[in-house]
Amino acid sequence: MTMFEYAPAPESRSIVDIRPSYGLFVDGEFTDGTGTPLKTVNPATEEVLSEVAVGTDADVDRAVRAARRAFVKTWGPMRPADRGKYLFRIARLLQERAREFAVLETLDNGKPIRESRDVDVPLAAAHFFYHAGWADKLEHAGLGPAPRPLGVAGQVIPWNFPLLMLAWKVAPALATGNTVVLKPAETTPLTALLFAEVCQQADLPPGVVNIVTGAGETGRAVISHPDVDKVAFTGSTEVGRSIARAVAGTEKRLTLELGGKAANIVFDDAPVDQAVEGIVRGIFFNQGHVCCAGSRLLVQESVHDDVVAALQRRIGTLRVGDPMDKNTDLGAINSHAQLERIRELAAYGETEGATCWQPEGDLPDRGFWFKPTVFTDVSPAHRIARDEVFGPVLSVMTFRTPDEAVAKANNTTYGLSAGIWSEKGSRILQVTDQLRAGVVWANTFNEFDPTSPFGGYKQSGYGREGGRQGLAAYLRSDS
Amino acid sequence: MSDRLPVRKTYKLYLGGAFPRSESGRTYEVHDAKGHFVANAAWASRKDGRDAVVAARGAFAKWSGATAYNRGQVLYRVAEVMEGRAAQFTEEVAAGEGLSTGRARAAVDAAIDRWVWYAGWTDKLAAVLGSTNPVAGPYFGFSVPEPTGVVAVLAPQRSSLLGLVSVLAPVLAAGNTAVVVSSKERPLPAITLGEVLATSDVPGGVVNLLTGDAAEIGPWLAEHADVDAIDLAGAPAPLAMELERSAAGTVKRVLRAPADEPDWSADPGLSRLRPFLETKSVWHPIGV
Amino acid sequence: MTHVLDPSALTGGGSLTGALPDPFADVTRSNDAFRAFLHGLPGVDQVGAQARVTQLGTRSIKSTAKAWAIDTAISMVDLTTLEGSDTPGKVRSLAAKARRPDPEDPSCPAVAAVCVYGDLAGVAKEALAGTGINVAAVATAFPSGRASREVKLADVRDAVADGADEIDMVIDRGAFLTGRYLDVFEEIVAVKEACGPAHLKVILETGELVTLDAVRRASWLAMLAGGDFIKTSTGKVSPAATLPVCLVMLEAVRDFRAATGRQVGVKPAGGIRTTKDAVKHLVLVNETAGADWLTPDWFRFGASSLLNDLLLQRQKLRTGHYSGPDHVSVD
């Protein structure tokens, strides 16, 4: 061997014990669902991992009633400090069982084990830890002297960060005194069901957290149940609009965290090597299945060729393949349907005249895969510059002045996030001021922290998750 | 009943992460509430105080520089480890303060919960006490709370554990390091707490616990040029005034003692966090 | 795989003394011009650089890859002793270890070089005769570099005359930090000339430069002045070699070759003590500068205790069980 070929370094699967079938988690217990069960597959191998119950209207009703009971009888009246202690317990249990969660997440989702291990699971635990502390400090959150919980929260989450999105939803809801009926995504239910076991280990009172698996119909049942006080959704803008329509005219409170088409703006004075890393992280983190992905790269014309060359060189070192290998950088696309959508939009890119570049290398035979892809010569009118691909596809455009960069960055119906790369602080702040986006990263990208509110402008949704602001979504401060 | 003869503990100081005897070689007798001899405690000297300040200063950069999340987890860990020793604390508090086992246990429980309360504050202080400042000009302005530095804490004299934790935990949660002089007559829970801190991921030197007389060591700490603040909770009225005057010489932040030792079980709010935080305001131009 | 310095490897770029590579022909026309050039290099964001090395630090190098990495690392070691108490006996003992690092296993590769103070270069040369292992000598008033240029050049000439194949010089950090870049440059050029046939490694002493921006500038300065290798540290200043520093230097040699066609080597030195550290560095080389740098001709470790840890790990791979410090030789 004359080259440094990394030998396979697979994470052991034996730490997880996947049951052949799973029920719904309602009122503290696993129960059968009345719908036709669905199969969840490993997208890297197309192997069926387990069969998961599907909740019907009746099942959802049972879950909502359990949540209401818990809200009235146990969780609502509980001393806030004790609610906090339960959340601290959950945070610790997530830390203790971190490897198990990471392996299960990677099997079910297709994301690299490095990411589930180093990002998803630690951040999920951190969200519980952070919100645990808020439980008895809500009067300090700036939401009035005695903010009160809303009641039962119906929450529907996506497949891109299954456990982390659960944490973003469940932790603030519980810390503020609400109870929860959560529907995980159809293709990634397993870590939510393992989380149900964590709730049992923590002795969380029955009904405080209820997990009802299923597809779109189940989600609709959750958000439209009349005894749900609060709806929280993360997912596509299209579904978000339909949810906003569905709750119109009701008393339900709603927060939406939807799609994005973030601009990552590279000025000519950027720290180039770190900018290249940030571009890679912005679009190839989690296979680009990230609502805040930096999918539009805006490069100042004078450095365009250098940045693109450095970017291509760097992408050439990305390791695409088995998500369970600890050295994998880019894993599997989560589902066949998503792969088809990515292929369709990438095909548009070529027919509309953009130049497509992909690195050398083969993809596995089985499973759902898409190579990291860079389109140059992209015009703002192209579909790949406007539509959310939700995959590892980057569209590169140029600008000449800061004003032009801002104009192009804001030229989207979305407004979730943006990135700026420059060594000049005042310029970063000026551009930040003008960007219509809920999160702006300067000289970094795709950083998340429970203390930092996250959410969108425009059609990327409304409401924030995390930080002091995130608590507002689950509290009534009119007392 | 067993006729086994128990092994007794030697109570020493907790200084720089270690458990030394007083450099002076002195000890004093500690009695329980009924006047029975319990142990000989180390009688800390001014030189022990000096060493404690050096240790606290040395530990400041790392502790204040740790992420708030990390500090929160460490303080929560203190609660976890303390819970495991609750029986021992209960025994010491009951004996020292003359409480029933039930009331002593309640004080211990409240002390554990107090760590949890402050563990949850570390990563929220900046959001609650900080601000962005909408200054009238092309500047981005923000203010952040930062720890004051080395804080000398004269612990309450009566409430030997709950009182001690109630004054120590906020100092740590804010990111300061501490030199604590324990209750003089009830010093033993402080040293047992030191054993908890030493096994709870709290870096050595962040907390230094001296058993002895606040009236003897307090003046040296109040005048010490490398101490940034002093909490007078355990100083009796005439001493407190003298110490506050001494502290003025180096413009120390002083948290005055209440006239009577308060009921430590009450919700402390932010009252003991604010005194040991500085506010730093930052200006940065906005322009292309 | 070669374990010996390839004599032709460094001659590709030709002699640089007095002539700068093409796109940079006039950047040293004045100190102001040189300063403008060095400060015009892209900045380095420290947080981003740290994040990158942390991520690469999670690479899991197992089985065949680990065996390859360990042997490669051994072959890259500049086995070093730089103490006031060094003696000919100590150097001979080190030379013996350099030839056969693991006396129980002849398949174990030899190290790249033995690195000593200049006055012991002759002893090392004699002890290593016929082995293909190079003698590296530190010079130029190592480690501080605080002496007149005449003394520094004499130091270099002495070591070369005594048989040093490689000279590890230190830059004048005082001059660098006060912005006298041209002085630093000219000194390196002069030392390079004094080296004659010996290869020149330029020690930046990054622990005293502190910022990664300064490391990048110093790297370019040293490469433009004709250094064959850029080296992090003397080992006498803390911190010595760190992964972010090594990352920035690897980026510099990569970009320098892309711009000029001339390849320069990198040598982290000091503070690398474990196999894990060494493997992290090799991963960094592989994924930053690329496989072209993964030979002893282009990458070295300046180390002493590292070698024994590599040997212990090598024994573990071979025998399947853990070994102990008594199973490798004491230097």
Image (tube, coloured by chain):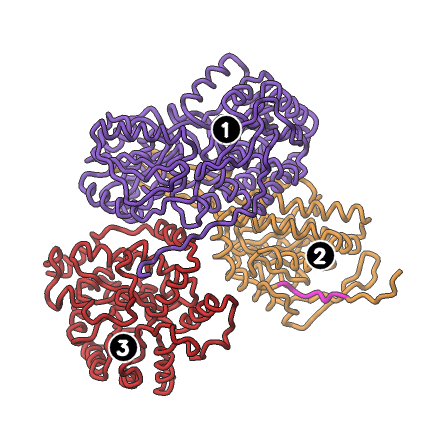
Chain colours: A purple, B orange, C red
> Looking at the picture, do discs 2 and 1 lie on one chain?
no
Q: Which residues are magenta?
A: B8-14
Percent coordinates x, y for residue A214 in the rendering: 54, 26
Determine the secondary structure under disc 3: loop
Q: Residue at x 27, y 40 (%)?
A: A358
Circle 1 packing at 10 Å, graded few (<14), some (14-19), many (20+), is many
Q: In the image, which disc is placed on residue A228?
A: none
Name the image quarter holding the C terminus of chain A.
Answer: top right
Establish if B71 lies above or below A1: above
Q: Which residue is mark 1?
A: A186
Residue B9 lies in the magenta-colored region: yes
Determine the secondary structure under disc 1: loop
Q: Is residue A474 visible?
A: no
Q: Is residue C186 or residue C175 the one in the foreground?
A: C186
Chain label for disc 2? B
Q: Amino acid at mark 2?
A: Pro
Q: Residue at x 46, y 70 (%)?
A: C315
Q: Residue at x 57, y 23 (%)?
A: A36
Mark closer to the observer (2, 1): 1
Q: Which residue is mark 2?
A: B189
Q: Amino acid at mark 3?
A: Gly
Label 3–label 1 contact, CB within 8 A: no
Dominant SS of magenta comes to loop
The residues bearing labels 2 and 3 have C-alpha atoms spaced at a distance of: 68 Å
Q: Residue furthest right?
A: B1
Q: Which residue is mark 3?
A: C132
